[in-house]
């Protein structure tokens, strides 16, 4: 693959990361990196537009010419800035602020991976929660962010595998029981054994998830065990197994900067998958079946959909 940093002038003589790199040059690197970040089709244009606006904000609005000059105040100012079409001075919607912060976390993540920036000015940027529910679905942009942060190194396989299984609707109580034999990579599915609260079913990982699970299989097969577990390798109690799986996912959420939000939990990943199923099918019973829920009410709560209110609205529109 072509080195995306080859065009940066004076790189070999830099005294510090990003010393001779302009925000516009970094933007080109970031856009290249976003193509490999596991973004959903609908997320890519949105995130790309956000980081492009951030670049314009830095260069045209603030006159910044070197990426090492980017600081927390610049990031905060951009995230909290009113929308261009807004006539008032009020802050943008909470969802808009979260989108901007998520896009910038990807931006700085890629910049650090390329050796252009040492820190991340978004780390201590706290925003109001996106919802008032106990657990909300992650957005597709946040899923892409977590995928990136699950890969602590080029050889890391456990954390991305755990996240991939959660994307396939596996709960932290189910993940410890999944073995290599439960994977059907050719058909793109994994058998989930269920739990006291969920039914047995096939889960369907994303394309990114299938790649991470295939990597994990190669890693665990080297141990000599006949049919090893994918994520949990210990012999602890049921509680300790679930706790280990919860920690593996929570660590990814923590690195992605989402763990401190009160409505984000490991179940938020499953809720994202349920929301995707509902967007695809429009059927709450399909959500319940594919997420292992035994109740339509619970499935609706999982994805944050008031299905009773929806039916009442349909009844009002129906002719008497």
Image (spheres, rainbow, N blue to C red):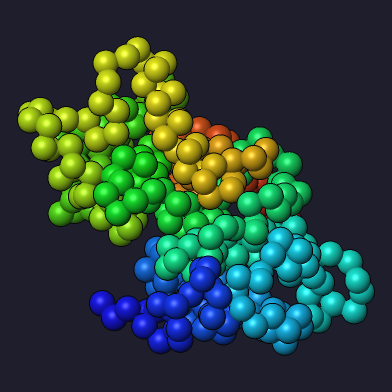
Identify the residue at horizontal 55%, vertical 75% (top origin): 19
Residue 114, position as x, y percentages in the image: 42, 68
Quarter holding residue 262: top right
* Left or right for 121, reference 194: right
Q: Is residue 256 visible?
A: yes
Q: Nearer the viewer, residue 13 or 44?
A: 13
Residue 258, position as x, y percentages in the image: 59, 46
Question: Which residue appears farthest toward the right when viewing the image?
Answer: 88
Question: Which residue appears farthest toward the top when viewing the image?
Answer: 237
Say which quadrant the N terminus sits in: bottom left
- 84 shown above or below 131: below
- 275 shown above or below 290: below
The number of discs equals 0
Q: Nearer the viewer, residue 119 or 263?
A: 119
- 93 shown above or below 131: below
Quarter holding residue 230: top left
Quarter holding residue 195: top left
Say which quadrant the C terminus sits in: bottom right
Q: Is residue 193 visible?
A: no
Identify the residue at horizontal 40%, vertical 77% (top origin): 12
Q: Nearer the viewer, residue 129 or 197?
A: 129
Residue 231, position as x, y percentages in the image: 29, 33
Residue 122, position as x, y percentages in the image: 65, 57
Identify the residue at horizontal 90%, vertical 79% (top origin): 87
């Amino acid at each position: 693959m072509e080195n995306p940093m080859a065009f940066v002038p004076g790189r070999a003589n830099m005294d510090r990361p990003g010393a001779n790199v302009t925000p516009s040059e970094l933007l080109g690197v970031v856009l290249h990196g976003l193509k490999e970040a596991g973004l959903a089709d609908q997320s890519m244009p949105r995130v790309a537009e956000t980081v492009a606006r951030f670049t314009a904000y830095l260069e045209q609005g603030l006159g910044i010419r070197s990426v090492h000059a980017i600081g927390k105040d610049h990031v905060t100012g951009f995230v909290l800035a009113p929308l261009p079409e807004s006539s008032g001075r009020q802050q943008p919607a909470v969802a808009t602020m979260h989108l901007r912060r998520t896009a910038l976390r990807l931006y700085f993540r890629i910049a650090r991976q390329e050796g252009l920036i040492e820190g991340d000015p978004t780390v201590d940027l706290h925003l109001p929660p996106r919802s008032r529910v106990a657990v909300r679905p992650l957005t597709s942009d946040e899923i892409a962010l977590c995928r990136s942060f699950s890969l602590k190194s080029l050889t890391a396989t456990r954390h991305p595998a755990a996240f991939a299984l959660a994307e396939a609707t596996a709960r932290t109580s189910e993940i410890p029981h999944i073995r290599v034999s439960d994977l059907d990579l050719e058909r793109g599915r994994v058998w989930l054994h269920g739990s006291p609260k969920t039914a047995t079913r096939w889960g369907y990982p994303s394309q990114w998830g299938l790649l991470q699970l295939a990597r994990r299989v190669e890693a665990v097969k080297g141990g000599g065990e006949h049919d090893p577990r994918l994520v949990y390798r210990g012999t602890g109690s049921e509680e300790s197994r679930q706790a280990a799986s919860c920690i593996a996912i929570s660590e990814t959420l923590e690195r992605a900067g989402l763990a401190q939000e009160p409505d984000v939990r490991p179940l938020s990943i499953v809720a994202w998958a349920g929301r995707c199923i509902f967007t695809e099918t429009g059927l709450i019973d399909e959500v319940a079946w594919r997420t292992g829920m035994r109740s339509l009410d619970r499935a609706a709560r999982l994805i944050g959909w008031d299905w009773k209110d929806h039916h009442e609205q349909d009844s009002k529109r129906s002719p008497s």
